[in-house]
Amino acid sequence: MKQKLSILAVAAALICSILGSPQTSHAQPFAGFAIPKDSTAAHRATAERTAKYFGMTSSQLDRNPVCCVWMEIRPWRPAPGEDGYIIIHQGGGTLIMATNQEQLDAAADRLTAASRNVAGKREVPVGLMTNFKVLENANATQASSDQAAASPDSKSSGSDKSQPESVTPIR
């Protein structure tokens, strides 16, 4: 339980740092694909199919070695809540976490659809992909609005189109 919470905390920290930086580059998936040793046959099939698409192989390991595309199912769904997936891709490794097999398949489809072919190798955008609702930082938006309203240079209309007026989902 402690390990699962720490992995989710690391994923949340990565998500926060990724959301703050522009997604401007692509990188090849690193080394190969790996899944937990106790994965189901369907989980293995998804990993093998996706690895093959990228011209790589898939392995079953005791734990995430970090330097690969790690695909795992974490049965986490609060009630009320939604199932979904998170893909965090960087040049040195990729983490794919899904709440169930259906979401793992959706994540694999999203990873392959987002990829591009460069000189015979597949590349994926560096950053975060998810089908969960992602919100902008409401505190930063409010602070910017408050500063604009307090500034003597601000226009009387109070409308600043460079900042959203409320927290909006990003898809």
Image (spheres, grey):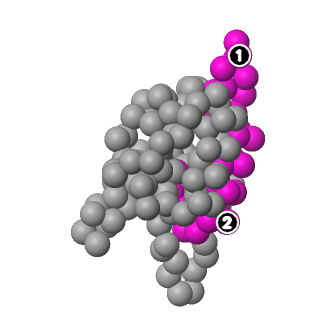
Element assignment for label 1: loop
- Image point 27% across, 63% down: which residue? 3
- Judge from the rendering whether residue 142 lies leftward or rightward of residue 167; answer left or right: left
- Residue 2, compared with residue 80, is above or below; it is above
- Image point 24% across, 69% down: which residue? 2
Kind of residue at badge 2? Glu
Q: Measuring from the top left, give residue 79's x and y in whole percent.
A: 53, 87
- Judge from the rendering whether residue 75 lies leftward or rightward of residue 122; answer left or right: left
| The stretch drawn in magenta includes residue 115 | yes
| The stretch drawn in magenta includes residue 149 | no
Kind of residue at badge 1? Gly
Q: Nearer the viewer, residue 9 or 75?
A: 75
Q: Which residue is mark 1?
A: 120
- Image point 56% across, 26% down: which residue? 27
Q: Which residue is mark 2?
A: 102
Q: Point out which mark residue 91 bears.
A: none
- Residue 133, compared with residue 17, is above or below; it is below
Q: Measuring from the top left, give residue 148's x and y in whole percent.
A: 52, 52
Near mark 1 (Cα within 10 A), the count class, few <14, some 14-19 or many ≥20, is few
Q: Which residue appears farthest toward the front when viewing the image?
A: 41
Q: Measuring from the top left, give residue 85's x and y in whole percent.
A: 58, 60
Q: Which residue appears farthest toward the top when viewing the image?
A: 119
- Judge from the rendering whether residue 12 lies leftward or rightward of residue 158; answer left or right: left
Q: Nearer the viewer, residue 113 or 56?
A: 56
Q: Which residue appears farthest toward the left when viewing the image?
A: 2
Q: Quadrant of residue 65?
A: top left
Element assignment for label 2: helix
The magenta segment: 96-124
Task: Indicate which disc, 1 or 2, sits on the residue closer to the N terminus.
Answer: 2
